[in-house]
Amino acid sequence: MSVLSVPLEELRTRLSAKWRLYDPDILPMWVAEMDTRTHPAVHQVVAEALDRGDTGYACGSAYAEAFAAMAANRWNWQLAPSTQIRRGPDVMSSIISVLLSTTEPGDAVVINPPVYAPFREVIRNYGRRVVEAPLTAAGRLDLATIEQAFGTERPAAYLLCSPHNPTGAVHTAAELTEVMTLANQAGVQLIVDEIHACLVDPGTTFVPIQTVPGGERAVTVTSAGKAWNLAGFKAGLTIAGAEVTEILAKGPVSGQSTPHLANLAHTAALTHAQDWVDDLVVEIAANKRLLADELAVTIPQLSYQPAEGTYLAWLDCTPLGLANPTRQFRERGRVAFSSGIQFAQSHRQWVRINLACSPELVREAVTRMAASL
């Protein structure tokens, strides 16, 4: 059975944010939740814990070991779980912990807009200064702009999203090697969010930052939450490069802060559901092609070029000449997307579309978009 085949009537019974924020007649394709059922292995381990009243504190290194095993198998990334990996509540908490460990109030931190909105929020909320090194018009890393930001702003850290959210760009080994070289030469701590690492199209190579030259000085933050749809079970990992493991001892977030049931769920996903995510990315890639085809026929003013990473489509709606595309699609078409302005002020005409759904819902979304016009 298809991974993305949960009927709409069943999805409508869910109580999560995706299905409860808007009116029931709105088709929600905004927040990054997937329309999947819980993998049986994850369901079993959580159910068994509840049956035995096992709802205390997390313990042990099974999650770190499961991730290290996957990293070695998928990417030939060799890790020492006991010294390089630390559990935390979730990816954003882990990012905060690393930022507090490696920067001081007032320090500059580089980001690449358009980018995941919480990046900007945590930098500002903890008294650091945002420095923007925007992506190119094609949605790739602009290495010259990054180098200039390092030289003129003297940042303490650089927060990179890999694969990139919202564009879906999968950074190449050459790009990451140059980024790592620039960061190390400038004394900038590179912090890389790799939560979408497993969500790349078949045939596409994801490159962990720590596997490129100089990557032993990078810090990776990640989680099984995105690829296995476990956002409700918060559990993140901070992975320090071999030369900066001391950062793990400085952070304010304790490994004990990982919820026990989340720790069990993520470990089960990494251990028993690798084939599941491999099947998933085939369906996501098909949905990207379907969206492009449907738009070409139904709303030919719009051109969508599928990216290789994530299950998020990044769509420029400027040709439609709308004052607010997201609002018009939601209010007139009854389909909800994420507004581009969340990711960059310069992208008010863009929308981010969640394609982790059935093909039927992709078609319905385009039909509703067209109806709104």
Image (tube, rainbow, N blue to C red):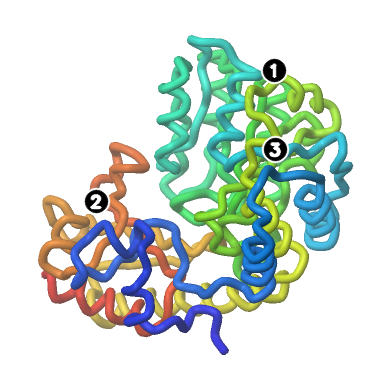
Which comes before the other along the chain, label 2 or label 3? Answer: 3
Which type of secondary structure does the marked residue at label 1 adopt?
loop
Q: Residues within 10 Å of mark 3 (few under 14, many from 20)?
A: many
Q: Which residue is mark 3?
A: 238
Query: What mark, if any, has residue 78 been given in the picture?
Result: none
Q: Is residue 89 left or right of residue 366?
A: right
x, y (%) of residue 142? 53, 38
Query: What mark, if any, has residue 349 been given in the picture?
Result: 2
Q: Is residue 223 left or right of residue 168?
A: right
Q: Which residue is mark 1?
A: 187
The alpha-carbon separation of the residues under discs 2 and 1 comes to 36 Å
Q: Is residue 328 left or right of residue 177?
A: left
Q: Does residue 359 lie above or below 86 as drawn?
A: below
Q: Residue at x 58, y 51 (%)?
A: 163
Q: Residue at x 39, y 84 (%)?
A: 7
Which type of secondary structure does the marked residue at label 2 adopt?
loop
Q: Do labels 2 and 1 touch, CB within 8 Å?
A: no
x, y (%) of residue 88? 65, 38
Q: Amino acid at mark 3?
A: Thr
Q: Do labels 1 and 3 touch, CB within 8 Å?
A: no
Q: Dividing the picture into quarters, in which one does residue 186 lie?
A: top right
Q: Amino acid at mark 2?
A: Gln
